[in-house]
Image (tube, coloured by chain):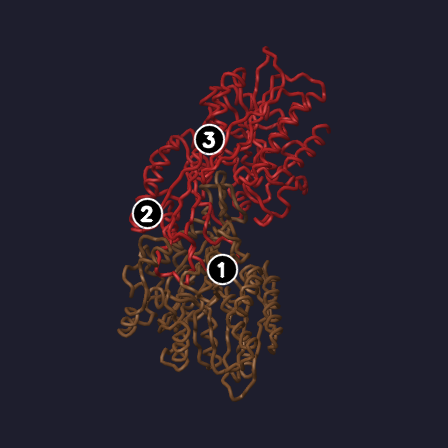
Chain colours: A brown, B red
């Protein structure tokens, strides 16, 4: 009961903060979110710090302060092991007019599901771990381990500044940490899961610039080479209708699928029909489970997210946009390397663009280059994870990978040398980065 | 002096109204704009009517009232000829963040240029004609002709509802009209001009719909056939890098360029270098004057305006958009027919889309189908126009065509059988439909 009331009240307060880290105009909300997180942990008697991680450089050359990173420590007993929980409290953009049926920043309880931006990604999971400590405190039970927290506010845009902070605190904050726990992911089905791999993400801007300002399409149409036509032309060369990536070198770098992996995928609980009906499509890119899971987890993919600078509102406008910027990203996997991907994509688009003989200017920028991550599922940490899931849910967890990116996992591993486990708390149908994001009360044992 | 003070004050009031007819949320401003127009004409003693032209059906099936059409009459002398001036007081969308250097709805005078959305298209030209009547009144000089006005508020989105109104009033309001004057266009250079043709406009929505909601590109990338990839794929088949329209049948329908036309284009005052530097490009689609003017005026063109439904904001978002809608338009010319173009485009895109074997749904809609218009430059009306220009500016006007669309010209001609003349008042560099639209004080003789 303690647990329930605490979580419900604080999650509502947290979701109410529009901590969208991709929008600099929302940066004050991000700062406030970090303050609220620190205050919460401080009120529980933690040793809390708000760590300044510097500034973010904007495309126009200006700088803006990054949200501080919150670190906290509960217990300092050298005879106990120390676990460090990582999480983030920034969120993806969300607007009611995107198609939400509830106000995205007003936590709404419908049939045991708590709807709100950030409910699952990643505010409720962070609070679940915080409240675990709080429940021990409320029941006056000693924590069996020392618990540390590291909570950031830039995850959704690539954890800007966190890498350097981890490097800087390797021999201080991280010196006594034995294990790192991340719950910034979800189950694959209604069966609990442990996650042992994530894809990386290379996020690109491709900007085509032509006339010095937008032009009337009637008055100028036919006389200028339009930037939008050029941009559409080069975007169309990224990927084939059947999902094949056309950028030279990308597919060659991918680790091949082993027989053992194939077997493991075969055994995972995953219902193609319910997956299809959940997302509402009649046909998927692949029709069998292994291909589908493999292309979700361990093969790269290209997504074109949208185009900035054109007319994107409802209704009609007869404009020739002067400058258009495509946003697309490549989820990459072992053994791809973001630095190589950046060069492959840039060289390819430049060569495709050159063939058009356009007087417009193309500029390709990689704004995020987050690496993939892969853990050893035989490690004692995963054995402990399996036992914990078994105890709580009375079932063996599926061992799964994540199609999305948790960039920091790779950094933790490379810098601290500690072992990392991903224990998903979010559900398989939580609508991350989408409309109507939610966290189920059942999933967080909040009934 | 009377003229100056009147125009300046009223133009400021008019520009202050955000009468953007493409945005239904701005519809109240459009209604207010029509009321203000009617009040102005009424205060001058005109016989004014606000004509209800019904409702507009929105894509979601709802309806919203169309802005009423203002008609007015000054003088009713059967011994005089009657001219009817057509104009519109709705505007294109404009936001400061589009790149305006002044507030778009705050008329700003910089070095004799009056900046503001709608200043040139079409509020100042409409006011110029209204104030012409007013100056006659102020100076107590009898008008040499009876003057009628027909002012609408939906021009920028295809003059919705006006056609039916013209048909309905053919034997009443239009029965005594001898000539129709339109000033909804601009000069080609610093030399005054009369316009004898306009291109039509077929405006299309191509909507590709896939999953039932937006998806996280990490979690789902690789498993779904993404609507954006499909849409980019079909858009890329509309036009070649060198501007050739690839839709079968379109080019074949275009009237061929006559020797006489070629000769006429050769003689028109048009400086390619200043055109290039004005729009800020290093290279145009064609490098000689005749090709350039011909492709601007009398050949069709395709412009892709933008994509709705994707991520079009600044920054990054890792979304697979569930439904994306491309907006593109084809400026058409004699002897193309909008109904035929609609079928050609729809059939072509459907066939291109079918080849992709995508499970997503494509829906092609033509939301505007405005016809091109062409006048006889030997008609007495054009002779009178030439004489008037000569008298005011002391120079022969160039006879030009307009790349843009003034849909109503064709309707006036077809329904009323009257002769039409286009007398441009706007300048060649007024930034119509673009940032920093302006009207020069010199151009409207407001010094």
- Name the quadrant containing residue B288: top left
Nearer the observer: mark 2 or 3; the answer is 2
Callout 2 crowding tier (Cα within 10 Å): few <14, some 14–19, many ≥20: many
Q: Residue at x 45, y 28 (%)?
A: B373
Measuring from the top left, give residue B298's x and y in whole percent: 43, 34
Q: Residue at x 29, y 70 (%)?
A: A267
Q: Chain of mark 1?
A: A
Discs 3 and 1 share one subunit:
no
Measuring from the top left, give residue A376's x and y in whole percent: 37, 78
Q: Chain of mark 3?
A: B
Measuring from the top left, give residue A198's x and y in whole percent: 40, 70
Q: Does residue A247 appear left or right of residue A129 in this picture?
A: left
How far apart marks 2 and 3 lie (CA) works out to 42 Å
Asked if the residue at tag 3 contacts the one at tag 2, i.e. Cβ–Cβ closer than 8 Å, the answer is no
The residue nearer to you, when weighing B79 against A284, is A284
Q: Which residue is mark 1?
A: A114
How far apart marks 2 and 1 lie (CA) works out to 39 Å
Nearer the observer: mark 3 or 1; the answer is 1
Discs 2 and 3 share one subunit:
yes
Asked if the residue at tag 1 contacts the one at tag 3, i.e. Cβ–Cβ closer than 8 Å, the answer is no
Q: Residue at x 45, y 47 (%)?
A: A225
Determine the secondary structure under disc 1. Answer: strand
Measuring from the top left, give residue A256's x and y in whole percent: 30, 71
Seen as rendered, the residue at the extreme top is B79
Q: Does residue B134 appear left or right of residue A41 in this picture?
A: right
Determine the secondary structure under disc 3. Answer: helix
Q: Which residue is mark 2?
A: B353
Callout 3 crowding tier (Cα within 10 Å): few <14, some 14–19, many ≥20: some
Nearer the observer: mark 2 or 1; the answer is 1
Q: Which residue is mark 3?
A: B264
Q: In this rendering, is residue B32 above or below A430?
A: above
Q: Chain of mark 2?
A: B
């Amino acid at each position: 009961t303690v647990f329930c009331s605490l979580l419900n009240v604080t999650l509502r307060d947290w979701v109410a903060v529009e901590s969208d880290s991709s929008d600099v105009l929302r940066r004050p909300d991000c700062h406030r979110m970090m303050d609220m997180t620190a205050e919460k942990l401080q009120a529980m008697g933690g040793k809390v710090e708000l760590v300044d991680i510097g500034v973010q450089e904007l495309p126009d050359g200006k700088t803006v302060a990054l949200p501080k990173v919150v670190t906290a420590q509960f217990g300092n007993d050298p005879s106990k092991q120390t676990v460090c929980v990582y999480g983030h409290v920034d969120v993806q953009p969300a607007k009611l007019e995107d198609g939400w049926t509830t106000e995205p920043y007003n936590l709404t309880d419908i049939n045991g599901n708590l709807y709100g931006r950030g409910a699952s990604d990643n505010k409720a999971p962070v609070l679940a771990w915080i409240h675990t400590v709080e429940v021990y405190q409320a029941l006056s039970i000693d924590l069996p381990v020392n618990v540390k927290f590291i909570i950031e506010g830039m995850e959704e845009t690539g954890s800007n500044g966190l890498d350097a902070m981890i490097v800087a605190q390797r021999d201080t904050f991280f010196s006594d940490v034995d294990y790192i726990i991340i719950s910034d992911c979800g189950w694959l089905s209604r069966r609990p899961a442990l996650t042992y791999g994530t894809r990386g993400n290379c996020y690109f801007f491709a900007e085509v610039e032509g006339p010095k300002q937008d032009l009337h399409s009637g008055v100028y149409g036919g006389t200028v080479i339009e930037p939008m036509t050029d941009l559409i032309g080069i975007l169309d060369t990224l990927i084939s209708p059947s999902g094949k990536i056309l950028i030279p070198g990308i597919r060659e770098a991918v680790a091949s699928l082993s027989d053992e992996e194939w077997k493991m995928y075969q055994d995972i609980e995953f219902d193609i029909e319910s997956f299809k009906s959940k997302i509402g499509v009649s046909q998927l890119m692949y029709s069998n489970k292994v291909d589908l899971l493999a292309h979700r987890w361990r093969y790269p993919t290209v997504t074109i997210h949208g185009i900035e600078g054109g007319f994107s509102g409802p209704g009609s406008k007869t404009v020739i946009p002067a400058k258009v910027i495509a946003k697309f990203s490549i989820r990459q996997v072992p053994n791809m390397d973001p630095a190589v991907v950046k060069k492959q994509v840039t060289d390819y688009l430049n060569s495709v663009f050159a063939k058009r003989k356009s007087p417009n200017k193309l500029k390709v920028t990689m704004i995020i280059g987050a690496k993939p991550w892969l853990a050893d599922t035989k490690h004692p940490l995963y054995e402990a994870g399996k036992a914990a899931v078994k105890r709580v849910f009375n079932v063996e967890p599926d061992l799964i990978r994540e199609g999305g990116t948790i960039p920091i996992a790779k950094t933790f591993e490379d810098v601290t040398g500690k072992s990392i486990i991903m224990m998903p708390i979010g559900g398989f149908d939580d609508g991350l980065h989408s409309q109507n994001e939610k966290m189920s009360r059942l999933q967080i044992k909040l009934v």
